[in-house]
Amino acid sequence: MSSIDSTSHATIAPSLSTWALRGIALLFALAMGLYGVVALDTGYVNFKGSGNAEVVAQRLELRQSADSGTPLPATATITEHSGMGLAALAAVTPPHYAYGSQGLSEPLVHYAEMPTSHGYMLALHNTMGGLLMLFGALQFWPALRRRYPRWHRAFGMVYVGAAVVGMLAAMTYLVLTPVARIYDQFTFTIGLWLLAIGVLSSVGLSMHHLRRREIAQHQAYMAISYGFLLTAPLQRYGWMLLGVWQPELRQLEANYAVTAWLIPFSFLVGYGIFTSNRLLQARKPIAVMARAPQAFPQAMALGRWLAWLLLPALGAGFIALLHHFLLAPGLSAYVGDSATIPAGVLALDQAVIGNHLPSRLLFVAAGGGSLLLGVWLVWGSFLRQQPVPVVLGWGLVAGSAAAGLVMGYWGLHMGMPSFATLAGGATWLCGAAICLGLAAALAWALQAGEAAWVREWSLFTVLTLLGVPAFYLNFPVLLLITPPEYIESGHAFRLASYGQWFLLLAAFVYSAYSPATQERFAR
């Protein structure tokens, strides 16, 4: 059976010209820099307004005006009491979206009501986040690292210091603040805890590899940390885009959809930054590669253990797909009469998925077939260290593309978010975008004969499709840790839906040590 030769060194031609890549990188850096300025301003506004009864009254009046349709105060007054970020949101969306109830107004009022010491912690977190965005994007620019290494190291010190201080401030704020007073309550609380832990862990691993002069791995974990941090600016930009597109929504409704995309999109942007850096680096000579087949023995040993654990997980995922999409289809069959998932979500799922047998059959065939191919991939390529067979790779391309099309069909028919249906079809549309994007990337790697990229993107594809049945494992666990008052409103369901994409993080970590990384110089 033919396979991709792991020693293939075909030249990679970037899909965009070098100038286009530089342009995209510059626009991204400017967008993150702009958010950095906004975050610094937010930190100042929160610091100045905390524990101030006069500010509380002004913000309550602002919310009442937004809900009643009364014209808002002058822009300068709005900016003074809510910051540039919300003022910009109000400039492009209806007043009720930026300042009305069921949105950002609740935490805005709380920020002014809370004790000054709490406000200091929040302001410190905001300020450090601004510094991270201002300095972070430039760190991944290869020309800066090569031409100005001292600036790179100086910016890196600022980045690491701001990450540690900012995340410790966030954790302190979470300990001091009741869940009911945090924006989006339990879901946002869990997300912020995971963000803080993820940033501190990835920055720590990055510095560990830097001390060992393992530059590629240092870059990888810095990109992972940056991916975690991107959740803040991308969420804000998402709020603005959805508010412009669907002005009738309340801001919290829009947040349901934005959050459905937030984790995978942030991870994949971070992964894209790391991958772009790898693609632009020179290849190591084959002789150099041959001398270091076990460059990271501990990571290799851990990877083998995880590969063994992945085999039964893939089998369980295949069985879960058969059961929950064919034998007992629909979330209603899954939860029965319990109120663990909102009624509107159950009804929408039944109408679009449960009552449409052809799409379910295609999804099980595509997704289930890909999971079985995943068993072949793990056994042959990750445990026996054999090249990925071409037929396996093209099978994953077909399976991922077909599954992505079905997800897109479901997502489009589920429609926009709402308080009744939560994210609506956003979660399925997110899965569709990931699957179709991975299918295209994997097809390119197969066509170009790039063995290392075929292996890496095959793993991404399999873990993405495993995420759908993984929901049925996540959900019962999250029910156990979610306070009862937040279950009926859908927080456990939302966290399980968003959590299925955390498997992408495992593939991202693998990429730090993968052949696609080790075969290139890190500069």
Image (spheres, rainbow, N blue to C red):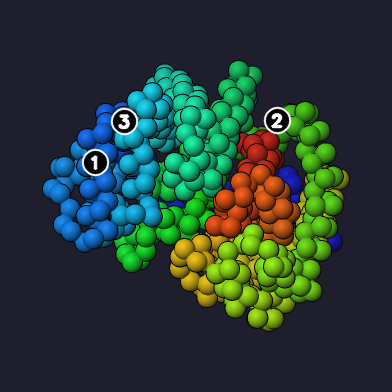
Task: Indicate the secondary structure of the residue bearing disc 3.
Answer: loop
Residue 437 drawn above or below residue 268? below
Mark 1: give few (<14), some (14-19) or many (20+) Cα within 10 Å.
Answer: some
Q: Quadrant of the N terminus?
A: bottom right
Query: Who is closer to the viewer here, 499 or 406?
Result: 499
In the picture of the structure, the residue carrying the numbered disc 2 is 288
Q: Residue at x 79, y 34 (%)?
A: 302
Q: Residue at x 15, y 42 (%)?
A: 76
Task: Indicate the secondary structure of the residue bearing disc 2.
Answer: helix
How far apart are the alpha carbons under marks 3 and 1? 12 Å
**Residue 172 located left or right of residue 283:** left
Residue 384: numbered disc? none
Whether residue 480 can be seen here: yes
How far apart are the alpha carbons under marks 3 and 2? 59 Å
Name the residue type under label 2: Val
Whether residue 451 can be seen here: no
Give the mark toward the camera: 1 or 2. 1
Residue 57: numbered disc? 1
Task: Indicate the secondary structure of the residue bearing disc 1.
Answer: helix
Mark 2: give few (<14), some (14-19) or many (20+) Cα within 10 Å.
Answer: few
Residue 50: numbered disc? 3
The numbered mark, 1 or 2, whose residue comes first in the sequence reads 1
Looking at the picture, how far across and down is residue 482, in whole percent?
62, 47
Q: Residue at x 47, y 48 (%)?
A: 184
Name the residue type under label 3: Ser
